[in-house]
Image (tube, rainbow, N blue to C red):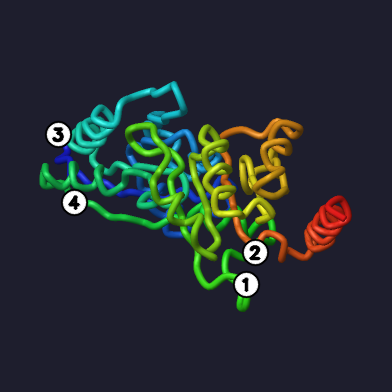
Amino acid sequence: MNKIVKPKVTLVGAGPGDPDLLTIKGVKALAEANVVLYDALANEEILAYAPKKSIKLFVGKRKGCHAYSQDQINQLIVDNALTYGNVVRLKGGDPFIFGRGSEEIEYVESFGIPTVVIPGISSSVAVPANQGISLTKRGVSESFWVITGTTSDRNLSKDVALAAKSTATVVILMGMSKLDQIIALFQNESKGETPVAIIQNGTMPNEKVGFGTIDTIAEVVHKKNLSSPAIIVIGEVVKERNKLKGFYKEFISDKVCARE
């Protein structure tokens, strides 16, 4: 007699990259998975928490290279749930922060399949924190923006221009290909000396970091060969990191002397 399959889908946030930053609840969900569909930004070391006999399927997307389209991923989730039962959809960071998690949940639930969402530690806050950068600080920054650098139509988000006018800390994900445009928007607001940090492969052993200002960060990126996946952090809180206070003090001092 065939065992009755009870379909279920659990959306799990894998965190910013370091496998130790996966939540305990995420570990428990993986331990019960029959199938795991995982993204490019989900550390493959995390798959060790799933049963050895479970099916592990890579469905990641990188710039210019998609294993599957989003529509195909949606259908794979449903097909595997109906065939094998318990499916874990493992997504980098938090699944609801530019992860299209809500779209996947809506599609799965349209088939009457029960769903659970397990939040993940978002790279937007964890990666700067790992570098000692506090996105808010009393007397320095009262808020922060988290913005996608590249929209679904491959353009720069219009919110970047709005954020450039504010005093808030600005965190931009998926923005390296639009860095020149981002720089120009902040320069238009006379913010050339605003501190910037770019953190590539945040929380991972191969993490690379570049620090500068709006006016100098393009040169820093070139010298350090920084590229995606990376997070751009713009705001005064960057120079408030203890290890950077001397760097920015020296930079500003040199700039004043040059003008004199």
Rounded to the nearest whole Å, what is the CA distance between mark 2 and mark 4? 42 Å
Q: In this figure, which residue is indicated by the disc labeled 2? A: 237
Q: In this figure, which residue is indicated by the disc labeled 4? A: 114
Name which of mark 1 and mark 3 comes first in the sequence: 3
Within 10 Å of disc 1 (Cα), the crowding (few <14, some 14-19, many 20+) is some
Within 10 Å of disc 4 (Cα), the crowding (few <14, some 14-19, many 20+) is some
Residue 176 is marked as: none
- Secondary structure at badge 2 equals helix
Name which of mark 2 and mark 1 comes first in the sequence: 1
Rounded to the nearest whole Å, what is the CA distance between mark 3 and mark 2? 60 Å
- Secondary structure at badge 3 equals loop
Name which of mark 2 and mark 4 comes first in the sequence: 4
Rounded to the nearest whole Å, what is the CA distance between mark 3 and mark 4? 22 Å
Rounded to the nearest whole Å, what is the CA distance between mark 1 and mark 3? 63 Å
Q: Quadrant of residue 86?
A: top left
Within 10 Å of disc 2 (Cα), the crowding (few <14, some 14-19, many 20+) is many
Q: Nearer the viewer, mark 3 or mark 4?
A: 4
Q: Nearer the viewer, mark 4 or mark 1?
A: 1
Residue type at the position of mark 3:
Asn
Name which of mark 3 and mark 2 comes first in the sequence: 3
Tag 3 and tag 2, C-beta contact below 8 Å: no
Name which of mark 4 and mark 1 comes first in the sequence: 4
- Secondary structure at badge 1 equals loop
